[in-house]
Amino acid sequence: MKLMFLAGLILVGAVFTGTMQAEEVTIKLGTIAPLRSPWVDELKKLDLEWRKITQGQVKIKIYAGGIAGSEEDMIRKMRMGTLGGAVFTNNGIINIDKEFYVFNIPFFIDSEAQLDYVISKITPIFENNIEKKGFKLITWSKAGWVNFFSKGPVVYPDDMKKHKLSFATGTPEMEEAWKKAGFRIVPNELKDLMMALESGMVDSFYLPPIVAASGQYFALAPYMCTIKIAPVVGGMVCSKKIWDSIPDQYKDKMLSVADKMVHNLYLKTLDLEKEAIEEMKKHGLKIVIIPSDALEKWKVVVDKGTDALMGKAFSKEIYDKAVQSINEYNKSNEKK
């Protein structure tokens, strides 16, 4: 009888201990950001914060510099369960949910504040879409804007139509949209951009200034147009299976800390962009200031190609929701 009683105590104790001690969760997180970069530095800080919040139950193991493969590879590995999450650029997120492509429409969103408003309005749609595909959107990330760089000065659309514009392969809908708008598009991989510029195959491109500086591409296209073409928006995504395994009482704080991380990172990115532009100016970059009437002319021309994207790159529903959000923002700010 005593043996049965002791065995019962051991069994109850084992069950009780199992419920009290939650299983540790290690999120294997991939990113194409270099190991020694502000992006990875912030992810290391996020790891420490998540450990504190969860009392050591949740940890992040970072696979930086593309060790986990391309962004497409990372998505595949997350689906297989060999990777728990990733920090994606806009192209990476598009591979999960094509609706995200709405942020890539040229001259669609005008300013940082307008972008923030649109994101706040359509986030629930993206969260729902991404969740249906087995993922959890942890936080958005912003990394500045894309600008034109060209061999000669570009102010208005007709100026760019005289140039041969390099265009990254892999997005045929956007390529068609630029062509329908009347521009001379030359499909070209980023790794081949310098060779294409040197040979004269292209004489213009559009990239974030940091990328134009790091690749030294600006040396052969030394005019930077100040007009903002599109924002660089990405996000941190987790496998839904991994996220669901984390105790609910920690999640709100974890998400709040992740939002703070990307905000800090964005501020650092802006500083890096300013440094990159100043450094390029020392080596011959010329800044082309855009007059107030230019943006509307760009929008009119580029709108001619938008129908090439509708229903292919993204749905009419998400486009209409984004337009509605932009109009709401503009209307609310007319009085200010």
Image (spheres, rainbow, N blue to C red):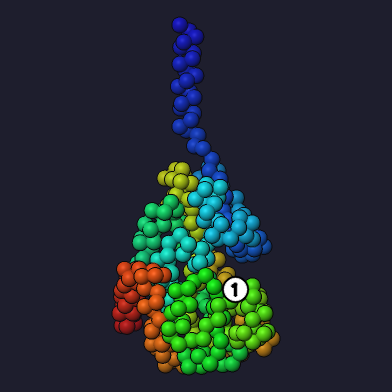
Q: Which residue appears at 52% of the width and 83% of the height?
A: 185
Label 1 SS = loop
Kindly indicate the quadrant of the structure image that contains residue 1. Answer: top left
Q: Is residue 71 visible?
A: yes
Kindly indicate the quadrant of the structure image that contains residue 268. Answer: bottom right
Where residue 133 appears, x then y in whole percent? Answer: 42, 54
Where residue 27 appears, x then y in whole percent? Answer: 55, 48
Q: Which residue appears at 48% of the width and 23% of the height?
A: 13
Name the residue nearer the viewer: 123 or 80.
Answer: 80
Give above or below for 238 relative to 22.
Answer: below
Q: Which amino acid type is shown beneath numbered disc 1?
A: Glu
Residue at the disc numbered 1 = 189
Where residue 73 appears, x then y in whole percent? Answer: 56, 57
Quadrant where the C terminus sits is: bottom left
Name the residue nearer the viewer: 316 or 249.
Answer: 316
Where residue 57 appears, x then y in whole percent? Answer: 53, 42
Q: Is residue 113 visible?
A: no
In the picture provided, is 221 more to the left or to the right than 80?
Answer: right
Q: Which residue appears at 36% of the width and 78% of the height?
A: 307
